[in-house]
Each structure stands twice: as C-alpha cells, then as structure tokens.
Amino acid sequence: MTYITKPRLHHPTLTKNAVGYTRRDYEGKISTLCAGCGHDSISAAIVQACWELDIAPHRVAKLSGIGCSSKTPDYFLGASHGFNTVHGRMPSVLTGANLANRELLYLGVSGDGDSASIGLGQFAHAMRRGVRMVYIVENNGVYGLTKGQFSATADRGSRAKKGAVNADAAVDLIGMALQLGATYVARGFSGDKGQLVPLIKGAIGHGGAAFLDVISPCVAFNNHEGSTKSYDYVREHNEAVNRVDFIDLAPEVKAEPEPGGVITLAQPDGSLMRLRKLHPEYDPTDRVAAMNHVQAHQARGEVVTGLLYVDGHARDLHAALKTSLKPLNVLAEGDLCPGKAVLDQINASLR
Ligand SMILES: Cc1ncc(C[n+]2csc(CCOP(=O)(O)OP(=O)(O)O)c2C)c(N)n1
Ligand code: SF4
Ligand SMILES: [Mg+2]
C-alpha cells in the first residue's frame, strides 16, 4: 500500500474560497514519504496556492513521472485529474493532454532524476516548445526512491551519505530552461513556503512554459554535511533576488510603477505580480542578464532563488500551432468536417 486515504470529515465552519471550496478540498491522500521530506512542503505549497487562487480542483490536470517526487500528486488536489506516467516521460504525456484540451491547468511534477537524468530530452523539448504548464522539479540531488544514488543535478565535489564524492558536472536545469526559451523561470526552496507559494501562483497565471526548480532536501539520503542540497547548506547559501509580495487577480488595478524597488509585472491571464527587488541591479525581464547572474552566483556556491526570469508576453504551443480553441472531445461533426467547398479550396491551394 503506497497511500492512506484521509477521512473526509469537514468541520462546517471551515473557511471557503470564492469558488466554494475549503482548503481541505485541495488536499489528497495522507503522504507516505519520510517525515521531514522537502517534497511534502511543496505539496502543501501547491494546495495553498490553488486554494488562494480560487481554482476549482476539477480544472487542474496533474501529471508526474516516477520517484518520491512523482508520487506526491497523490497527496494534493485529490479531486483533480491525474496521470502518473513512466519515468522521465511526464512532459510528452502532458503535451499531448494539453493539445487535446487547452482549458485545463496543467501541473507537471517531476524529480531531478526524472527530469535531469532519464527525462532530460523530454524536459528540453517541453521548454523549447512553450507548452503551457507549471513544471515543478522537486530537486534533492539524488534518486530518493531508489535509495540515494547521485542524480544529474548533484554538484561536482558534493559528498554522498556514505562518503563517495561526485566527480561529474551538474546538469543546471535553471540554466537550461533559460537557454531553451522557458518564459517563467524560478527557483524556490521547500523550506521557504513564504517565497514558494507566490512563485507557484505566478507560474499558474503565466501563459507559457513556467519552470520551477525547487530545492527539496531528501532527509533519508542527502541531508548530511558535504551535500549541497541539504537544509543547512541551502539556508546558509540562499541568495534571493526578489520576493513576490502578492499577486493581484483584479485586472482592473492599474500597473503603477512603485517606489522602493517594487516592480509590477502584468501576467498573460490579466493578473498582476508585484516583485520586491532584493538585488537592486537584478532585472527579471532580461533573459541574458538572468543567465549571467545565476551562473556567477552558482560559481561561488550560492543558491540563487526567486523569480529569475519572466516574459509577460509569452506565447504557447497552441498559438504556434493555431490549434482549436475548443477541447477535441467537444468538437462536433460540423467542426471536424467543414464540407466539400472548403475541402476543394484546401486541395486547390495545395496544387
Ligand atoms: C525506466 C526506468 N528506469 C529506472 C527506474 C528506477 N527509478 C525509479 S525512481 C528513479 C529515480 C528517481 O529520482 P528522482 O526523479 O530524483 O525522484 P526522487 O525520488 O528523488 O524524488 C529511478 C532511477 C524506473 N522506475 N524506470
Ligand atoms: S527517500 Fe528522500 S525523497 Fe524519498 S521520501 Fe524519503 S526523504 Fe523524501
Ligand atoms: Mg531526486
């Protein structure tokens, strides 16, 4: 048994959001992950973000691969659509589902092994195609589920629990996402929910490929001295570039420039995001500057967090392919078969 069902007892006085759901309605089964696993904190942040954004659970499709991280969709949004795919194949299954029905909100949950090792090609193509999704990698630098082997995001020189030193260079998913054209790129830490919840909310409101690398310590296999993915290491080396103070979903509010290092960014869904700059020189709308900043700090062993890059005019794969506005399963015969005259016209244009 890999999960335990939660009792559905609701106290009648629980606060409901604008679409009539309590926070409990966004939870899933009881987690069977190790106590203290960072992945559980990310699940809690997803629950909070969706509840606060008044997203009806049936509007969400959550997909994952294989790993402790990929098990987590069972522990949140129990009333949403879900598909636990094959190791490293979440992006292609999600892309297919997304193309068939653009009305759902797609949440892809993956691990560093799932996305940076076996699924690296899948990750790359989802980013470069601009598949509209919230892609979360719960990054602990190890294969947690198979008992702690180094994953491809483990830093060179970092030490495994039993002392082995990692000789390989790390795959930098943030650098890759930036280079491949993702239009919302952020890094969070499972131990900082105050930063993570707004980053997830921003990704949900985004109109293209939104990538979130969340450092999520594995307490069983990678939380010791010498690891660069432990709670202590990330707390000591965290360098936040900004703080998303809040996301205002009232589109009528005008985006006014604010004094004191606050910038307001319009999101494709009409919401507004306010970023409080912690590094005055950091510009999250400049892709090249973001790459340089992250690389420079990474070279010093710092873990840069915050909203690293955002393009407020993102276009997604549907725009590029000019796909149907309606989900494929509601297209009627008239939509699919436009008649002889239209067919003749298409054939003539190809002669
Ligand atoms: C095709 C295939 N290869 C290998 C495995 C074995 N396997 C299961 S989970 C996993 C790695 C998971 O690591 P990660 O994605 O980082 O998730 P974590 O458990 O650390 O959250 C591997 C190699 C598998 N299930 N399927
Ligand atoms: S093995 Fe690691 S990643 Fe898996 S549940 Fe335990 S702490 Fe989390
Ligand atoms: Mg992992």
Image: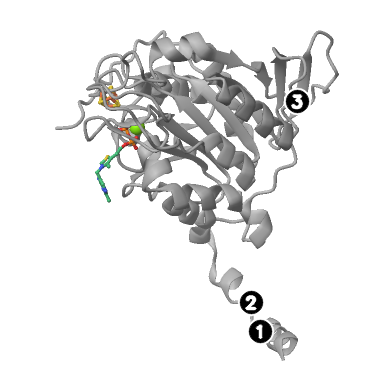
> Circle 2: is it few (<14), some (14-19), or many (20+) Cα within 10 Å?
few
Q: Position of residue 144 (x, y in %)?
A: 28, 30
Q: Which residue is mark 2?
A: 338
Q: Secondary structure at mark 2?
A: loop
Front position in the image: 94 or 250 = 94
The residue under label 1 is 343
Specify whether 108 is left or right of 262.
Answer: left
Disc with the residue nearer the chain's start (3 vs 2): 3
Depth check: 7 or 174 in front? 174
Q: Is mark 1 within 8 Å of ligand 1?
A: no
What residue lies at 64% left-to-right and 49% top-to-bottom?
316
Q: Which residue is mark 3?
A: 283
Amino acid on which disc 3 is placed: Asp
Image height of 313 relative to 256, above or below: below
The amino acid beneath tag 1 is Leu
Q: Residue at x 53, y 31 (%)?
A: 212
> Marks 1 and 2, how far apart in space?
7 Å
Q: Quadrant of residue 340?
A: bottom right
Residue count near mark 1 (Cα–Cα under 10 Å), binned few <14, some 14–19, many ≥20: few
- Mark 1: secondary structure: helix
State the residue lying farthest toward the bottom. 351
Q: Residue at x 28, y 21 (%)?
A: 8
Q: Quadrant of ligand 1?
A: top left
Badges 1 and 2: C-beta atoms under 8 Å apart?
A: yes
For the residues bearing labels 3 and 2, Cβ distance under 8 angstroms = no
Q: Quadrant of residue 320?
A: bottom right
Give the residue type at disc 2.
Pro
